[in-house]
Image (cartoon, rainbow, N blue to C red):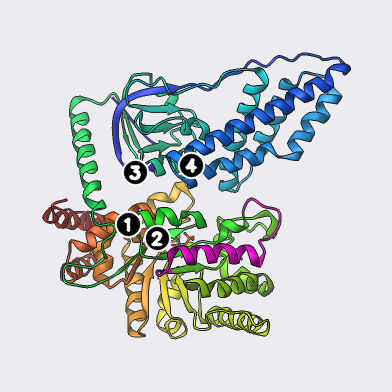
């Protein structure tokens, strides 16, 4: 039995036989051609592009009907690669110059593109290397006249083990045949992770050498929640995990029964359970999982993967769409939070030594009010189409908040001058994710309608631990007593001023933390949609009194580790009593 750990990409436990997928190797001849053959080679290239396009469009249609529009849209990026003028022109010009057959020239240009993309530091763009690789291999296959490899011959439910899985590979598999995914490379935002999550199949990625350690047919245990993979487990381990797998499946069904019910405790306290999104088309997943609103709409994605800045109209269309889709529930739009680990080339943010402490989020927006106002005007204009609120990220003190509010007033005035409609009474909030804001939340509370605690940053700033650095990841403790005291301070200050306090950091969707946060008085929990049924179920299974008791006990504990153990035990008891 060997155990190893990778990146937990999609939750759940699965047990099954390994099915290894090797990298598809092509032998590409380097054949010289005659000048008069060049037009024919160009024609071959064009035909391969057309054939590839048709394949992708067909695949997209099938995915849309089998899995939904969101999953199908992953292939939009592939279609864009096919239309990339630079790539096409480079192939044609090298073909003319070097006079070597088109499969060889294309494979050389493809290698160059992949190497450039894989060196980009932006994690999102880096992950897109697999799009180029995937579509590139399709074109090569068509240039060489090869058949696509197929996964339709899978006879039993297997765990796919691969160096990397291309989107078209995952798309040609079916949920009934695949119990899990294990890959050598990839991160939390890789396509394998995205697809596995939406198919609700456990996945562990980034294992580095899984394909070397695992043989075809080995029995695997994949724990997609912890990132653990166990190869050929002994009978006792296997039995333990199988029991856990069955339990989780049964429990997930029970949680789902609560998803459309209100989040009310047994003694009648109602809280808001809402979702975090990054793209407008995630609203369908939000509704499917029973969210009553969006507590964090991150807007950075607008600015990614493009050369120019998004226009006011683009912002407006997206916000209007989300507002209308979510009506009558609220949608909290967070204004631009660039910088830190979210970089963009076209905004020319200089490289800083400590970007997380640098020119990011509200600091960056306040320094460029004209750019900031484009987004503010769009949010205001969209506010007539639903229940929109807005909030500012990374507020560190009252002056920033006052400045942001002043720019908002200017934006309102500009719209009034143009006689454009908007909700003049739009609610404005501050994210509390910097310790200085948490400590002065009584002062900030006078100036806003609500708070939303961003624990992802609050944890990194209060424990001085970079949230992206795996070497200090062991120190990144959501339940650290310092973090809990800051959270309590913010909730108390907010309530003393009569405003509501929510949380939109990952901690809000941690089942273990739910009782404690409820007991501290949190009003709104905003989380990834998939976590909603479970957290709702927990809220509905407890009383405020029980939750307050948990919170009181937790505040006496000296370490985050002890808080984790204590809250886990309390949660287990409450769920047992509730029959889950
Ligand atoms: C947070 O910091 O908790 C948060 C929600 O913001 P982001 O993760 O986008 O920085
Ligand atoms: Mg943040």
Which residue is depicted at the point 28% across and 58% down?
Answer: 535
Q: Give the residue pinned by disc 3.
A: 11
In the image, residue 317 lies in the stretch drawn in magenta: yes
Q: Specify the quadrant of the image occupied by residue 500.
A: bottom left
Residue 303 percent across, percent down from the top left: 62, 57
Q: Badge 3: how crowded within 10 Å, few (<14), some, or many (20+)? A: many
Distance from label 4 to label 2 (Cα)? Answer: 23 Å
Of residues 130 and 293, the one drawn nearer to the viewer in this rendering = 293
Q: Is residue 520 visible?
A: yes
Helix, strand or loop at label 1? It is helix
Q: How many marks?
A: 4
Q: Is residue 459 left or right of residue 61?
A: left
Which disc number belongs to residue 471? Answer: none
Does label 4 or label 2 sit earlier along the sequence?
4
Q: Residue at x 54, y 45 (%)?
A: 73
Proximity of marks 4 and 2: CB atoms separated by less than 8 Å:
no
Q: Nearer the viewer, mark 4 or mark 1?
A: 4
Mark 2 touching mark 1, by CB under 8 A? yes
First along the sequence among labels 3 and 2: 3
The residue singled out by tag 2 in the image is 275
Picture coordinates of residue 316, whole percent (x, y)? 59, 67
How far, Cα to Cα, is label 2 from label 1?
Answer: 8 Å
Disc number lying in front (1 or 3): 1
Q: Residue at x 65, y 42 (%)?
A: 80
The x and y percentages for residue 151 are: 44, 23
* Callout 4 touching callout 1 (CB < 8 Å): no
- Give the magenta part as a residue range: 304-330
């Amino acid at each position: 039995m060997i155990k190893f750990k990778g990146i937990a990409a999609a939750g759940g436990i699965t047990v099954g036989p390994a099915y290894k997928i090797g990298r598809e190797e092509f032998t590409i001849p380097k054949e010289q051609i005659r000048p008069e053959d060049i037009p024919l080679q160009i024609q071959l290239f064009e035909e391969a592009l057309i054939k590839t396009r048709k394949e992708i469009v067909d695949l997209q249609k099938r995915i849309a009907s089998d899995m939904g529009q969101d999953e199908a849209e992953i292939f939009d990026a592939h279609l864009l690669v096919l239309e990339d003028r630079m790539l096409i022109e480079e192939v044609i010009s090298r073909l003319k110059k070097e006079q070597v057959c088109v499969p060889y020239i294309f494979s050389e240009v493809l290698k160059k593109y992949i190497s450039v993309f894989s060196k980009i530091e932006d994690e999102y763009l880096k992950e897109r290397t697999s799009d180029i690789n995937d579509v590139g291999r399709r074109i090569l296959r068509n240039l060489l006249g090869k058949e696509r490899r197929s996964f339709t011959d899978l006879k039993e439910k297997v765990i796919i083990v691969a160096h990397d899985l291309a989107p078209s590979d995952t798309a040609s598999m079916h949920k009934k045949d695949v119990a899990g995914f294990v890959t050598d490379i990839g991160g939390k935002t890789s396509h394998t992770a995205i697809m596995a999550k939406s198919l609700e199949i456990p996945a562990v990625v980034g294992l580095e050498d899984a394909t070397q350690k695992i043989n075809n047919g080995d029995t695997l245990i994949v724990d997609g929640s912890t990132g653990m993979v166990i190869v050929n487990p002994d009978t006792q381990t296997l039995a333990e995990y199988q029991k856990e797998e069955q339990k989780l499946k049964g429990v997930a069904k029970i949680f789902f029964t609560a998803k459309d019910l209100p989040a009310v405790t047994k003694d009648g306290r109602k809280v808001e359970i809402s979702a975090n999104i990054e793209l407008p088309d995630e609203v369908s997943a939000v509704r499917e999982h029973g969210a009553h609103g969006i507590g964090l709409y991150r807007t950075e994605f607008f600015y990614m993967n493009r050369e120019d800045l998004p226009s006011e109209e683009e912002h407006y269309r997206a916000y209007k769409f989300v507002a209308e889709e979510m009506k009558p529930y609220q949608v909290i739009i967070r204004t631009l939070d660039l910088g830190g680990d979210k970089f963009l080339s076209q905004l020319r943010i200089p490289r800083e030594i400590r970007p997380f402490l640098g020119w990011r989020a509200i600091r960056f927006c306040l320094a460029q009010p004209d750019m900031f106002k484009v987004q503010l005007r769009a949010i205001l204009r969209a506010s007539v189409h639903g229940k929109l609120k807005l909030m500012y990220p990374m507020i560190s003190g009252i002056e920033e908040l006052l400045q942001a509010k002043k720019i908002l007033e200017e934006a309102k005035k500009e719209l009034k001058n143009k006689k454009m409609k908007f909700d003049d009474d739009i609610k404005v909030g501050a994210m509390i994710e910097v310790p200085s804001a948490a400590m002065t939340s009584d002062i900030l509370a006078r100036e806003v309608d609500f708070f939303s605690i961003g624990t992802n940053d609050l944890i990194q700033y209060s424990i001085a631990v970079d949230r992206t650095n795996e070497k200090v990841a062991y120190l990144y403790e959501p339940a650290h007593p310092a973090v809990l005291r800051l959270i309590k301070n913010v909730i108390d200050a907010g309530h003393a001023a009569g405003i509501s306090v929510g949380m939109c950091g990952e901690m809000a969707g941690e089942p273990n933390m739910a009782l404690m946060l409820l007991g501290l008085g949190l009003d709104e929990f905003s989380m990834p949609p998939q976590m909603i049924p479970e957290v709702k179920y927990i809220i509905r299974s407890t009383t405020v009194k029980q939750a307050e008791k948990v919170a009181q006990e937790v505040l006496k504990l000296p370490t985050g580790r002890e808080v984790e153990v204590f809250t886990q035990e309390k949660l287990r008891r409450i769920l047992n009593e509730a029959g889950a």
